[in-house]
Image (spheres, rainbow, N blue to C red):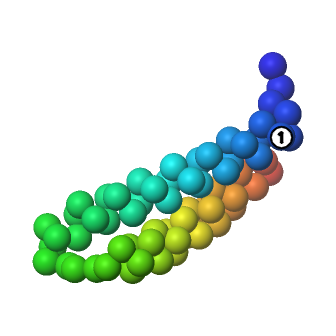
Amino acid sequence: MKQSRLMSLVEAVTNVAVGYGLAVVTQIIVFPWFGLEAELGEHMAIGMAFVAVSLARSYLLRRLFALI
């Protein structure tokens, strides 16, 4: 069954939201292991940077594989 455009959008938004939440929670847990301290707002900003990189990577890989 082919995925509709709406469901593709829902999947992409869900993937980004889950990835962002996971990034922030992971940072909160892992940073102290390395002696790094950050406020929640800083964790959220760092998480956004990683989400942006992840989105760009995902998009570029999808486009690359579409060419193959």
Say which of 62 and 46 sits in front: 46
Q: How far across and down, in percent of the image, does residue 44 sit?
A: 44, 72
Residue at 59 percent across and 47 percent down: it is 15
Say which of 58 and 47 sits in front: 47
Residue 12 left/right relative to 19? right
Residue furthest top as drawn: 1
Say which of 7 and 1 sits in front: 7
Q: How far across and down, in percent of the image, does residue 39 sit?
A: 31, 79
| Disc 1 secondary structure class | helix
Quadrant housing residue 56: bottom right
Residue at 51 percent across and 49 percent down: it is 18
Residue at 69 percent across and 58 percent down: it is 59
* Residue linked to disc 1: 6
* Residue 11 appears in view: yes
Q: Classify 27 as above or below 16.
A: below
Residue furthest front as drawn: 40
Mark 1 Cα-neighbour bin, 10 Å: few <14, some 14–19, many ≥20: few
Q: Amino acid at mark 1?
A: Leu
